[in-house]
Image (cartoon, rainbow, N blue to C red):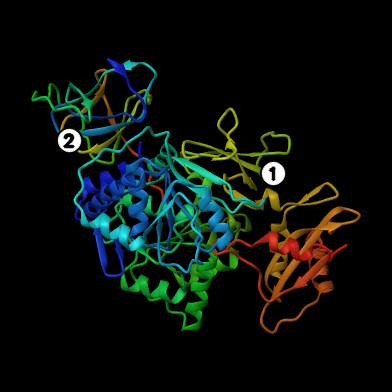
Amino acid sequence: MKLLRAGTRAKCAVCETQIVVLRAMAAEAELTCGGVEMVGTDNPKTSQAHAAAAGPAPQIGKRYGNGADTVEILCTKSGTGALAVSGEVLVLKQAKALPSSD
Amino acid sequence: MNLVVALEMAAECHPQRVALSAGGLHLSYGDLLNAARAGAEVIRDAHVNVVGVLDTNSPAVPIALFAAAYAGVPYVPMNYRLTKVELEALLARITPALLVMGAPAIPALDIPEGIRIVQSEDFQRDAMASSPQAMSAPGSPHEVAIQLFTSGTTGKPKAAVLRHENIMSYLLGTVEFASAAVEDAILISVPPYHIAGISAVLSSTYAGRRMVQLPNFDPKTWLQVCRDERITNAFVVPTMLSRIIDELEQCGGEARLPSLRAIAYGGGKMPLCVIEQAMKHFPGVDFTNAYGLTETSSTICLLGPDDHRSAFESQDPLIRRRLTSVGKPVPTIELQVRGERGEALGTGQVGEIYVRGGQVAGEYLEQGSLLDSQGWFPTRDRGSVDDFGYVYLEGRADDLIIRGGENISPGEIEGVLLEHPAVSDAACVAVPDRDWGEAVGAVVVLKDRAATGETELQDWVKKHLRSSRVPTAIRFVDELPYNEMGKVLRRVLKQQFLGTVE
């Protein structure tokens, strides 16, 4: 359990998933991918397999959030394990497409 | 989040896709990422606090932008059209700096101590020649990413500061990652020192849209490059669009740009007649009006293609006038119109526009943050919001004419003057007045072979507006002074009136 902070980057301890935290609640939480706690991007990968895989596989450029809309995560590298915060699987957030302005 | 994440993600997602074309050179996202990392090593070895850029659009520009972010120092593109004295003063304010200097006709500068110069071509070549180590983006998202000198009205340019968190907030809020098709290409013709030039690089990278650079705008070349490079998207300032239309009309009116799908415009007020003509010439093209400021990391309001079409086709004046609106705030921006005592105004009432959101930096190096305790930024733009939520701009607060305590917006008088059949261009400024403190002075450009006089135009304004709006003095000139972004230089006009009107 640790505080999630906006701007924190993390990777899956098992698969290729990498993320950055865009928004976080001010409370301790466990961020997992495939049921395994995510690690810092500079940390080595552990060889464990995913513990759980129910939920959408993270896709690069997509955003994922919890039901209360207190957490938002951007996937910066696609992987296979579903993202979850303290056991709650995060779902894909659909952004409204804007016309290109620059 | 450091802005290089945008490039890292693009290189991860489609490393082979072309990111940038310039002349015969094509750089993939993988190439651009390598060049940014190698460029960062050059910057680190120089032991500087800032990366300055004095160049037209060239491959060195986006490389330097991302390299500076990797090196953890601010990126400071500067206006190469400034005078020798102005440029030397700006350079003295960014030392110690590495200055990436390109081909534009810059007067021979006396380079201040603490500025190390690298030629743009050499910087680009060195960055592309080496195979750098993978490096992670440094620093906190609160670090300064970009510093842009504004053309301050009070004389000394202010250094607007944009942090990584502001830029990324804009990018994530307005651009869908990898949303561009593989054949998409954007023509970048705004100069690199303008916020639109910077956001074009970042948005295109994040969307995965190939950038094609135009070093110097002229309408003939713009049209030619659009055809040759199968351009699908373009961003222009109003003067560019108006010159493109003139060029089309001079050579028979056929645009012949089958690949062009979207034109976004901004950077200054778009005259109604120009956008109407543009929509006639490019019936299949999606037009988007983007309103933004340097201090807000670019776009805060958008008038999209559907709004353009419905306004263009409508007979209802309330809908028709939307073509002169800047649209609605983007979803990540809150907007408020406030009165003189700071009170929130209702729809239809004109006041100063305040905005709030993650992309709003509202900060200068010298003055610090201009955000209030709730995070609202005073844009100094005057405007109103209609019952449908569309935002209409009335000009800069600093351009207001205050006649006997009454606030007069130059825009409304200019609009009326422009409707006169003999007038091709007009600008109004405050002139000193013995009785009222200030009065309206108008500078007018007549159409070819048209004739009218001061009295006739005064009567014309009196017919349409209150008498306080009638210009006390009207001058006729061959053309109005504009800067390269299409903004009227009102200071110059004011000075011309000074001492000649009592």
Image coordinates for residue B308, horizontal then vertical, percent: 50, 58
Q: Which residue is at 72% across, 57% downward?
A: B410
Q: Residues within 10 Å of mark 2 (few under 14, many from 20)?
A: many
Q: Is residue B407 above or below residue B421?
A: above
Nearest the camera: B411 or B491?
Answer: B491
Q: Do the residues under discs 2 and 1 have CB atoms within 8 angstroms?
A: no
* Quadrant housing the N terminus of chain B: top left
Residue receiving disc 2: A79
Tell which tag, 2 or 1, sits nearer the viewer: 2
Q: Which residue is at 36% across, 42% downward?
A: B3
Q: Quadrant of residue B181?
A: bottom left
Q: Quadrant of residue B271?
A: bottom right
Q: Is residue A57 above or below residue B494?
A: above
Nearest the camera: B69 or B461?
Answer: B69
Q: Residue furthest front?
A: B113
- Secondary structure at badge 1 equals loop
* Quadrant housing the C terminus of chain B: bottom right
Q: Residue furthest right?
A: B435
Q: Give the residue type at disc 1.
A: Gln
User: Which numbered dot is residue B448?
Assistant: none
Residue receiving disc 1: B349
Image coordinates for residue B496, horizontal then vertical, percent: 75, 66
Q: CA distance from mark 2 to mark 1?
A: 51 Å
- Secondary structure at badge 2 equals loop
